[in-house]
Amino acid sequence: MTKHEYETIEVEADGPIGRVTLNRPDKLNPLSTATLLELADAFTALDRVDALKVVIVSGRGRAFSAGADLSFFGSPEANQGLSPRESADAGRLMVESLERLGAVTIAAIHGHCVGGGLVLAAGCDLRVAADDTRFSIPEVDLGIPLAWGGIPRLVREIGPAMTRELVMTCRPFSAEEARSLGLLNRVVPAGDVDAEVESLASELVEKSALTLRATKRHVNAVLESMSGAVRNWNDADSLVAALHDSESRAAAARYLERIR
């Protein structure tokens, strides 16, 4: 077994199965700039492990991920020494490194899957969720656009109409609704997610690596022609602009006051 040491995530590769686990359970696994950089590094490192056929992405504790770390809004130290634009672009680079993985990726989702956490899950090839998972995309309420390439990835999975509704209204939605929209492959009883994902991973590793990778590359090539996710390098510019827009900042202040 090979393990890689990180501060906010756990990463391991055990034969044909790798695991990346968000590991800040006390904060519901927020996606800080530090975490995004670690995830990008981990996915890149795992892509060099030839034996891997499957990589499972999950969150420790009560949630998959509470989304972007809200310290991003008030603490320059949270940017890890990066410029504002570089920090705003870290999520896009993370998801693109995830999608470049040759191995099949499975998101194991439970608890809350919020904003950037949903973009992380959407970047995986397959998604399994607990039936009591709550999804939401609060970015517009926070006075920022959904970035990191989230819009085209949602459009390709659930279509433009529901992408507009869920992103613009910020309303929560259930695992069953997410499955009916096509976002999830499977919904299982709470507590059964890990067993279901392990069973799915075990089924996949019995296939040949060549055919798994060829299928993944073929599907991804079709998706890229449909959604053009690689164009999202300018998401960071929209995000930085929103952080300097007075109406957007006022909206964020109202939202943060409501959830405190």
Image (cartoon, rainbow, N blue to C red):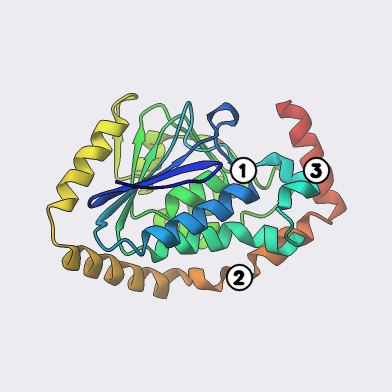
Q: Number of numbered discs present?
A: 3
Q: Position of residue 4 (x, y in %)?
A: 43, 49
Element type at mark 2: helix
Q: Position of residue 211 (x, y in %)?
A: 17, 66
Of all residues shown, which one is farthest toward the right? 246
Please, what is the three-letter code of the amino acid marked with disc 2?
Answer: Trp
Mark 3 / mark 2, whichever is N-terminal: 3
Please, what is the three-letter code of the amino acid marked with disc 1?
Answer: Thr
Question: Mark 1 near mark 2, Cβ–Cβ under 8 Å?
Answer: no
In the image, residue 250 sits, relative to residue 144, either above or below, namely above
Task: Pick the residue in front: 86 or 6.
Answer: 6
Q: Position of residue 74 (x, y in %)?
A: 80, 43
Mark 1 / mark 2, whichever is N-terminal: 1
Please, what is the three-letter code of the amino acid marked with disc 3?
Answer: Gly
Q: Disc 2 marks which residue?
A: 233
In the image, residue 231 sits, relative to residue 202, either above or below, namely below
Question: How much space separates mark 1 and mark 2, taking CA atoms?
Answer: 25 Å
In this view, the mark in front (3 or 2): 3
Dot 3: few (<14), some (14–19), or many (≥20) neighbours within 10 Å?
A: few
Q: Disc 1 marks which residue?
A: 169
Q: Is there any visible trace of residue 209 in the rendered image?
A: yes
Q: Is there any visible trace of residue 160 in the rendered image?
A: no
Mark 3 / mark 1, whichever is N-terminal: 3
Dot 2: few (<14), some (14–19), or many (≥20) neighbours within 10 Å?
A: some
Q: Disc 3 marks which residue?
A: 74
Task: Locate residue 193: give its quadrant.
Answer: top left
Q: In the drawing, does residue 252 fall left or right of residue 35?
A: right
